[in-house]
Image: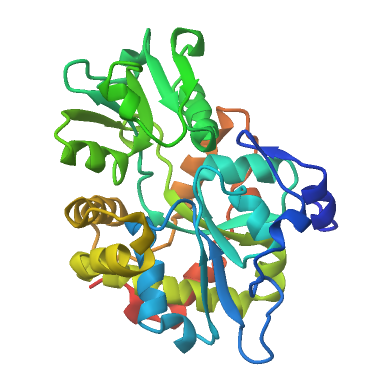
Amino acid sequence: MSSQFDRRKFLTRGLAVGGFALAAPTVLSACVSGGAESSSGTGFGVASQRLAWIKNTQFAGSYFADKNGYYTQAGFSGAELVSGGPTAPPIESDVLSRTFAGVSQVPIVGSAVAKGAPLKIVGAVYQRYAGCVMSMGAKPINTPEDLYGKTIGCASSSEPVWRNFIAALGLDSSRIKTVPVQGDPIGMTAGEIDGYLGFINSQVVDLRAKGFDIRTMLLADVGFPLVGQVYITTQDNIDHNRDKLKAFLKAEVRGWKDVLADPQRATDLTVSEYGKTLNLNPQSTLQCCLAGNELIRDGKPGQQILTVSDEAAAANIASIAAGGLKLSVGDLFELGPIREVYQENPDLALA
């Protein structure tokens, strides 16, 4: 990757990533934050990050980091959590132009990096990616081979993941019909599609709460060992704002420790404050939080949240390589900062 990469040229040429066209900087400039250049004369400025989706419990660690003052204690003047959603600009373009960090998915970041974006994955919340194939109990999809002859709904934002999954498992894509479905799997309950590429800590919980018999096939359990909910930032931030990056990661780790310790409080913050306008169901939201916590834990004592082992990073690279993304671990991951956070703060590890 050339160190002379021109960020503005990358944005203005409308590079397509994961089915989206990356917007020009002028489109994204309406929201001013403390991105790579601190907007404050003191400290690190604003801890700005672009979220991958709407403000549900998927980002509760950041809510705790904000609410409990972890960002300000780390040297930031405050926080800006920019919502995502089906009509939001691509995460990668936001991180390149207006926010310090973002939350994304390995294949989507890999697609951007392969096309020249100076981005790196610097941590991962989930040890196992939350993506799953949802299906109805009367017509379950339990194995990858069960996908043959089926129609699967897939949001455009998840299309790179789906394409890589099919390739990594050596499935015949011509025997699987994929149709665009934006963020809502309800058509599956009416028999319009046979399955939906959703998230085990989101749509699955919502449909089950409505009384539907939903079966799941977690991609990570059937030969696609991705980490999930990855934090990304620019190479420039890694090179020139390393202390700021470490401060950000430390605040996030503290927030996620709180989510694991008190999922009910995480639910309350989501429903009553950060996701208040979404009118979320408290019971379903708690179940989503608990499902997410299971993806965070690796079952080992002294776990270091957000870290990615060398073996896991290599497995992620191998998985996306099958889909045509020929990257090295060093091209996509920069794990030095999060490891330094734990070296300097060993008490952050889970008890």
Observer-nearest residue: 156 or 101?
156
On the question of residue 302 being in view, the answer is no
- The x and y percentages for residue 14 are 77, 42
Observer-nearest residue: 280 or 11?
280
- The x and y percentages for residue 199 are 34, 40
Quadrant, the C terminus: bottom left
The residue drawn where x is 52% and y is 44% is: 106
- The x and y percentages for residue 99 are 62, 65
The residue drawn where x is 63% and y is 51% is: 92
Rendered view: 277 above or below 129: below
Rendered view: 174 above or below 137: above
Q: Is residue 252 left or right of residue 186?
A: right
Rendered view: 19 above or below 2: above
The residue drawn where x is 51% and y is 52% is: 84
On the question of residue 325 being in view, the answer is yes
**Colour convention:** rainbow
Q: Is residue 332 left or right of residue 24?
A: left
The residue drawn where x is 58% and y is 54% is: 333
Observer-nearest residue: 202 or 123?
202
User: Residue 200 sits in which quadrant?
Assistant: top left
User: Residue 347 sits in which quadrant?
Assistant: bottom left
